[in-house]
Image: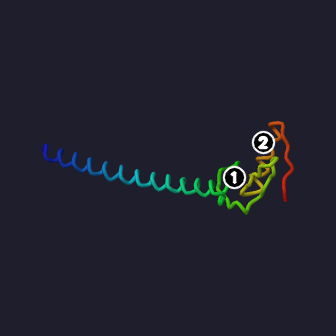
Amino acid sequence: MWKWLLLLAAIYVLYRLFANDFLKKKKTDEKEKAEEMDRKAATGEMVKDPECGVYICADAGITVRDGDKIHRFCSYDCRDKFLRRLKEGGRRLPPEI
Ligand SMILES: [Zn+2]
């Protein structure tokens, strides 16, 4: 009887090992992806949409100038949300394009 228990325990341990490996690998992949995005963002190739957090090409997208800073958005929806947020915070920026 205890042989079966031992077998079950062994299967459980193996299962946990594989499951852990799998989860760890997935996490690393996601981390690497995020790091690559950060690197591209740092070099100016890609910029982050401040509204939804999506990365877009630095020379594409919808822009809003905020003094000497330029915000880029993936869509007019995000731009409008951003402008609305600024407005609610007492600021107003003219949209570009
Ligand atoms: Zn967006």
- Give the quadrant of the C terminus: bottom right
Q: Quadrant of residue 58?
A: bottom right
Residue at image position (63%, 55%) is: 41
Between residues 21 and 16, which one lies in front from this camera angle?
21
Q: Judge from the rendering whether residue 18 lies leftward or rightward of residue 32; answer left or right.
A: left
Residue at image position (30%, 51%) is: 15
As helix, strand or loop, the secondary structure at mark 2 comes to helix
Residue type, label 2: Arg
**In terms of sequence position, does the residue under pointer 2 or pointer 1 come before the other?**
1
Q: Which mark is residue 41?
A: none
Whether the residues at callouts 2 and 1 have beta carbons within 8 Å, the answer is no
Ligand 1 neighbours mark 1 (CB distance < 8 Å): yes
Between residues 8 and 24, which one lies in front from this camera angle?
24
> Where 67 falls versus 61 (above or below)?
above
Picture coordinates of residue 63, whole percent (x, y): 78, 56
Q: Judge from the rendering whether residue 92 lies leftward or rightward of residue 37; answer left or right.
A: right
- Give the quadrant of the N terminus: top left
Q: Judge from the rendering whether residue 4 lies leftward or rightward of residue 34; answer left or right.
A: left
- Alpha-carbon distance for marks 2 and 1? 14 Å
Residue type, label 1: Asp
Q: Residues within 10 Å of mark 2 (few under 14, many from 20)?
A: some
Total labels: the figure holds 2
Q: Quadrant of residue 88?
A: top right
Q: Which mark is residue 49?
A: 1
Picture coordinates of residue 62, whole percent (x, y): 77, 58
Q: Residues within 10 Å of mark 1 (few under 14, many from 20)?
A: many
Between residues 41 and 52, which one lies in front from this camera angle?
41
- Return the residue at label 2: 85
Q: Judge from the rendering whether residue 1 lies leftward or rightward of residue 8; answer left or right.
A: left
Residue at image position (53%, 56%) is: 33
Residue at image position (62%, 54%) is: 42
